[in-house]
Image: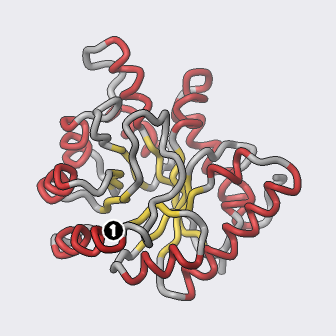
Amino acid sequence: MTNPLRLGVNIDHVATVRNARGGTKPDPVRAAHLAIQAGADGITAHLREDRRHILDDDITRLRAQIDKPLNFEMAATDEMQKIALKVKPHAVCLVPEKRKERTTEGGLDAIGGHKQLSIFIPPLLDAGIRVSLFIEASPSQLDAAKSLGAQVVELHTGQYCYEIGDARTAELARIAAAARYAAEIGLECHAGHGLTFETVGPIAAIESMTELNIGHFIIGEAIYLGIENVVKRMRVLMDEARSGTGTL
C-alpha cells in the first residue's frame, strides 16, 4: 500500500502582500482556512526575525484558529524559542536565516551548529513540540539531525527546482537517496522550497517522503486562480505521482 503524502501550505506571502500596504488585508489566517478547506493537511508559517511577512499576532491567531497542525518555521534564536514555547505549535522547523536574503538560502548546517542546536532543541522537545531541521540532502547532515534528537527533517528542494536536464535528474537522485536514508535511521522525511506544478511530481513519487511544504508558488498562482483551486490542483498532482498515475 502506498504511504500517504501530506501537503503543508506556507501562507507567508499572503502576509507579504498585506504588509506592503499595511492594515489587515489580505489576512494569512483566512488564507490558511481556505487552503485547509481545499485539502491542505497543515499550515506552515515562518516568523522571521525582521518580521518582513508573518507577524507575531499571525502566529498566535493561526495556533488558535486553525484545526490542522501548525508548522512554525523559525531561526534557532532565544527570541524564537521563547515564542515557540509560549505558542506551542504542533511542530517547529529550524531554518537558516540571513537578514538580507530574499528567501531561505540552502539548508541549516546541523554539523557546524551542532553544539548550539544541542542546547536549543531539548526545551522544545520537552514541551511536546515536534522538531524538524531544514537541511540539505546529505547523509552527514541527516546523521547530525538524528543525533540532535530531531524527529523530522525537511530536505531542501531549491536546487532541484532551479536545475534542468541531467543536473535536475542528479539532484532528484540525491534527494531520493537522502529520503531513503532518513527512513532507515528513523527520521520522518519532508521536502520543500521552490516546488511548482511542474516540479512536484518526481518529489511526490519518492516513497520515503511523508510531507511536502509549498508556499510561494501556491500563493503566486492564487492571484490568477484562487488559493482553493491551486491547492486542489497541487493535491491532485501529488496524489497522482504517488499512485504512479501522473503524467509528470
Q: Residue at x 43, y 45 (%)?
A: 36
> Who is closer to the viewer here, 140 or 25?
140
Q: Residue at x 42, y 38 (%)?
A: 11
Q: Is residue 114 above or below residue 25?
A: below
Q: Residues within 10 Å of mark 1 (few under 14, many from 20)?
A: many
Q: Residue furthest top?
A: 21
The percent coordinates of residue 181 (x first, y second) are 60, 82
Dot 1 falls on a residue whose secondary structure is strand
Say which amino acid is labelled 1.
Val
The percent coordinates of residue 175 (x first, y second) are 67, 67
Q: Quadrant of residue 81?
A: bottom left
Q: Quadrant of residue 20?
A: top left
The percent coordinates of residue 26 (x first, y second) are 36, 21
Q: Residue at x 35, y 55 (%)?
A: 71
> Who is closer to the viewer here, 100 or 181?
100
Q: How is the image coloured?
A: secondary structure
Q: Residue at x 36, y 59 (%)?
A: 94
The percent coordinates of residue 86 (x first, y second) are 12, 55
Give the mark count: 1
Compared across the picture, whether 186 is left or right of 179 comes to left
The residue that mark 1 highlights is 131
Compared across the picture, whether 21 is left or right of 119 comes to right
